Image: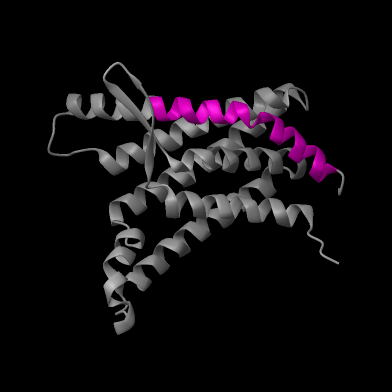
Amino acid sequence: MFKIQKLDFIISLYIACIAISELMGAKTFPLFSIGNFPIHASVGIFVVPVIYSINDTITEVYGKARAQSLVRSGLSMVLLFLLFSLLATHLPPSKIFLHSEKAYEEIFNFSARIAAASLTAFAIAEFADVFIFTKIKEKFGKNALWLRTNLANFISEFLDTGIFLTLAFYAFNKPFGINAAFLISLIIPYWLLKCFMSVIETPFVYLGVNWLKKDK
């Protein structure tokens, strides 16, 4: 009989969303324009809020220590993925695949700066999410799950967005003012989009919590 343990499914979904974000998040698509200013988003916008929602779900049901363990596991998978990408792209291809090697390297051969920015932002934001969610729960108890999950997500997603974009795209050969204006134009719209997705996904946090609690 085909049976999947609920916690195993949630953890697998968490790792899958991280992999999707790292592997496919480099693609952006147009959303809308504010005057002549176009707003774009990474395709990762659909999975990044899910990662934080799963964090909150695990914290709510299993506690802070289990959630931190999940974050450490996710970080390990990101590091493993990045290291294996370096290995795979530096190995010589078989002759039959020579024609596709350039495309393969363009997809998987991340720059060291982008990889470091992604890993740093992910680590800080994920642990911050668990910490903030736990602190709010200590103050409000088990009530207002919607407030706890969204407030934790808003703050941690701001850290994630701000740290990654700053580390990845700060131009050291340009004045601070130019960098600040450019980064703010990227960070604020993208962060607001993440917040919007977090709000939309709030009901799924409730469903996930209730679903997991049935097996405890």
Determine if the magenta segment contains residue 3: no
Q: Is residue 92 above or below residue 81?
A: below
What percent of the width, then of the height, locates residue 63? 73, 42
Residue beneath the point at 27% across and 73% down: 99
Residue 184 seen in this snapshot: no
Residue closest to the eye, 191 or 122: 191
Residue beneath the point at 19% across and 24% down: 177
Image quadrant occupied by the N terminus: bottom right
Residue 209 seen in this snapshot: yes
What percent of the width, then of the height, locates residue 26? 37, 47
Residue beneath the point at 29% across and 30% down: 183
Answer with left or right where residue 21 lies relative to residue 6: left
Q: How is the image coloured?
A: one colour
Start and end of the magenta stretch?
189-213
Residue closest to the eye, 52 or 101: 101
Q: Is residue 56 above or below residue 105?
A: above
For the image, the number of numbered tags is 0
Most common secondary structure along the magenta stretch: helix
What percent of the width, then of the height, locates residue 43? 45, 42
Answer with left or right where residue 46 lies relative to residue 180: right
Which of the 4 image quarters holds residue 2? bottom right
Extreme residue toward the top, this view: 35
What percent of the width, then of the height, locates residue 85? 39, 66
Q: Is residue 6 above or below residue 84?
A: above
Extreme residue toward the bottom, this view: 95
Which of the 4 image quarters holds residue 3? bottom right
Residue beneath the point at 25% across and 28% down: 182
Determine if the magenta segment contains residue 194: yes
Answer with left or right where residue 65 lies relative to residue 157: right
